[in-house]
Image (cartoon, grey):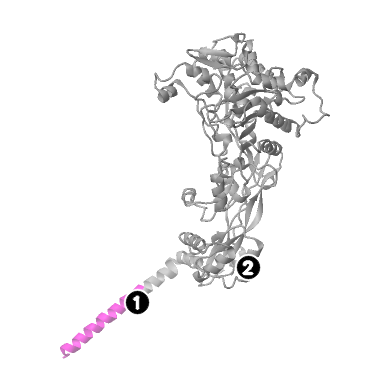
């Protein structure tokens, strides 16, 4: 009979063997799961540990003008990258010295990259020069994890800068990274403004991936299966614009020493022929990581070169807005076209005198537009009233966004009775406010792109197409084109209304006594309206809007020159030259071989000085 001690030892052995049996059974079951049941799942994980996908950035889409001229190109550049998993932190100082970067900046970018993945390359410095590339190659074995990638950088091959139209690129921010989501990683370059931003998804293309074998230390040892499984990047789509490179470059040169904007549209489609804001800036240094000193200089520049005056300003349009008053009066049946006003150089309303500074005598509506008679429109606006005036202003696109495809835009301000009551209180404003609004002054505020659309709509007798720069998007060689469709609007007016207003605009440019003789084009009938908008902070702003040819408009334009003075002297000549460049492909007014038509001889021989002097007769010309 076994002793108590023997029984205890036997029992312990059984428990031990049972525990070992359970343990081996668990390992066997687990091994069975891993090898057979979950082989696909864990096989893929194993491959992920031995195969690394190195992203390949696609070539960004190009930008062409309406004639096929390449406006925005790409050039090759080299970017230094670091693989955090392989990089030895003790070599940070040496890498920083080669790159000419502060060591703290290299560390900062590495930490940002590691927060997303230790196994993805982190971009440290873009567009390195050849000596830097050579120094990295010489020390590649002592700088583990440091490599470089070939990328593309924006290049602008023509004289057309297009700073606010094309827009610039920048390295993606933390906020953008979260907002844009899948497909973007830290260090990517994205469109920040203009067309680059608006059409970012199309221009960017699709990233590819190069599969490489890595060892247990994460070092690349060669391509995976000879690269048969690599995914090539898909190039971005090219943008084909309505822009005319010649007009864009000319308008920029004419505004070179000025502040203001030029916007030219194709009235038949709404296509942007030119969009200029001055002062502007060079896009090339902003095509990646912008140097901090340059960015500070641009932001601190008193000329505000980053501000898009073509779409964001809100200035009174001056006398260029007088056609709205005339249209409202004719459509509402308030006056007939032959209604006349005796202009003695001023108009008294209540205890205040509103000056014209020129005596026009007796004028009807056509003559009042031609000569820009303030006294006529002071009185006409009082007859029309605020809300009918605002209604027709809205019909021509004022007080709302145009929808132009460059992402940044102001709606301006079109005051109504409701707005005036909110702003001043029901008893805080009087009919005296209407007198100033009648000549485009006061609370009214517009943008040059709105004014260009207004000119186009006048030229097309009521049809207005949404302004847009991009006409089609296509792959290389123009394959798979995708046309950009935009909405159109129409205001239905009586034929007599159009005839009266447009005849007045034609006379502004073509007839003696008109205020825009300097906008004339040899051989072409043009129409327009000048404006000299008072500015309480300095000299008046010069405006001109117009279109050409008169019977079949092909270009409509708005020119704003800040603090320049009279619209006929400073804005109209810019418009005339842009008309010539677009219609003839060159400037013709300085070409003696280009004859003037007989019908215009009288206008051409009129004394420009006397015409300019006639404009000085009003404050809102």
Classified by dominant secondary structure, the portion drawn in magenta counts as helix
Q: Residue at x 54, y 49 (%)?
A: 296
Q: Quadrant of the N terminus?
A: bottom left
Above-or-below relation of 132 to 616: below
The question of residue 17 being in magenta is answered with: yes
Please state which of the two labelled residues, at mark 2 or mark 1, is closer to the viewer.
Answer: 2
536 left or right, relative to 251: left
- Badge 2 or badge 1: first in the primary sequence: 1
- Tell me the residue that label 2 is attached to: 135
Above-or-below relation of 2 to 209: below
Alpha-carbon neighbours of circle 2 within 10 Å: few (<14), some, or many (≥20)? few
Image quarter of residue 566: top right
Residue 42 location (% of width, % of height): 45, 66
Answer whether residue 363 is visible to the viewer in this image. no
Q: Is mark 1 on a helix, strand or loop?
A: helix
Q: Mark 2–mark 1 contact, CB under 8 Å?
A: no
The question of residue 389 being in magenta is answered with: no
578 left or right, relative to 415: right
Q: Which residue is drawn at 61% across and 24% down?
A: 531
Residue 271 location (% of width, % of height): 64, 33
Residue span colored magenta: 1-26
Of 47 and 375, which appears nearest the observer? 375
Of 47 and 29, which appears nearest the observer? 47
Q: Is mark 2 on a helix, strand or loop?
A: helix
- Tell me the residue that label 1 is attached to: 24
Mark 2 → mark 1, Cα distance in angstroms: 57 Å
Q: Residue at x 31, y 78 (%)?
A: 21
Residue 495 location (% of width, % of height): 62, 15
Answer whether residue 427 is visible to the viewer in this image. yes
Residue 598 location (% of width, % of height): 80, 19
């Amino acid at each position: 009979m076994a002793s108590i001690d023997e029984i205890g030892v036997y029992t312990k052995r059984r428990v031990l063997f049972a525990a070992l049996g359970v343990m081996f059974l668990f390992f066997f079951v687990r091994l069975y799961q891993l090898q057979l049941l979950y082989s696909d799942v864990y096989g893929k994980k194993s491959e992920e540990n031995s195969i690394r996908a190195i992203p390949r950035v696609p070539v960004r889409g190009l930008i062409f003008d309406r004639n096929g001229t390449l406006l925005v190109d790409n050039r090759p550049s080299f970017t230094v990258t670091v693989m955090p998993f392989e990089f030895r932190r003790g070599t940070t100082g040496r890498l920083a010295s080669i790159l000419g970067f502060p060591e703290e900046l290299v560390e900062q970018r590495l930490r940002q990259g590691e927060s997303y993945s230790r196994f993805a390359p982190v971009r440290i410095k873009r567009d390195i020069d050849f000596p830097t590339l050579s120094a990295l190659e010489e020390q590649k074995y002592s700088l583990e994890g440091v490599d470089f990638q070939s990328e593309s950088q924006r290049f602008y091959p023509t004289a057309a800068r297009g700073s606010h139209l094309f827009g610039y690129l920048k390295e993606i921010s933390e906020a953008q990274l979260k907002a844009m989501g899948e497909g973007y990683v830290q260090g990517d370059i994205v469109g920040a403004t203009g067309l680059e931003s608006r059409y970012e998804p199309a221009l960017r293309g699709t990233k590819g991936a190069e599969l490489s074998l890595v060892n247990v230390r994460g070092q690349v040892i060669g391509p995976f299966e000879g690269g048969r499984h690599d995914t090539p990047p898909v190039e971005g789509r090219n943008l084909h614009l309505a822009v005319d490179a010649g007009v864009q470059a000319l308008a920029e040169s004419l505004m070179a020493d000025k502040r203001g904007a030029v916007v030219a549209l194709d009235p038949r489609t709404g296509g942007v022929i030119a969009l200029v804001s001055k002062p502007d800036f060079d896009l090339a240094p902003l095509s990646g990581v912008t140097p901090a000193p340059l960015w500070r200089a641009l932001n601190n520049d008193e000329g505000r070169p980053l501000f898009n005056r073509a779409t964001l300003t809100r200035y009174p349009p001056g006398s260029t807005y007088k056609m709205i008053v005339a249209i409202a009066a004719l459509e509402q049946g308030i006056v007939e076209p032959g209604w006349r006003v005796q202009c003695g150089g001023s108009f008294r309303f209540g205890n205040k005198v509103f000056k014209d500074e020129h005596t026009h005598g007796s004028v009807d509506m056509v003559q009042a537009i031609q000569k820009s008679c303030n006294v006529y429109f002071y009185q006409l606006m009082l007859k029309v009233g605020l809300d009918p005036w605002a209604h027709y202003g809205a019909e021509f696109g004022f007080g709302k966004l145009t929808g132009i495809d460059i992402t940044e835009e102001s709606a301006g301000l079109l005051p109504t009775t409701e707005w005036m009551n909110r702003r001043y209180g029901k008893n805080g404003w009087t009919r005296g406010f209407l007198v100033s609004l009648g000549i485009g002054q006061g609370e009214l505020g517009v943008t040059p792109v709105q004014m260009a659309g207004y000119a186009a709509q006048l030229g097309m007798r009521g049809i207005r197409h949404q302004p847009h720069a991009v006409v089609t998007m296509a792959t290389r060689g123009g394959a798979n084109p995708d046309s950009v469709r935009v909405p159109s609007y129409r205001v239905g007016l009586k034929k007599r209304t159009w005839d009266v207003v447009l005849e007045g605009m034609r006379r502004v440019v073509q007839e003696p006594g008109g205020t825009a003789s300097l906008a004339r084009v040899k051989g072409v009938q043009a129409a327009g309206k000048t404006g000299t908008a008072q500015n309480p902070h300095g000299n008046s702003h010069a405006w001109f809007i117009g279109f050409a040819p008169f019977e079949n408009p092909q270009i409509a334009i708005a020119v704003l020159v800040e603090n320049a003075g009279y619209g006929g002297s400073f804005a109209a000549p810019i418009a005339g030259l842009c008309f010539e460049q677009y219609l003839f492909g060159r400037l013709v007014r300085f070409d003696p071989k280009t004859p003037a038509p007989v019908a215009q001889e009288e206008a051409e021989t009129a004394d420009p000085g006397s015409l300019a002097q006639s404009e000085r007769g009003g404050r809102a010309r």
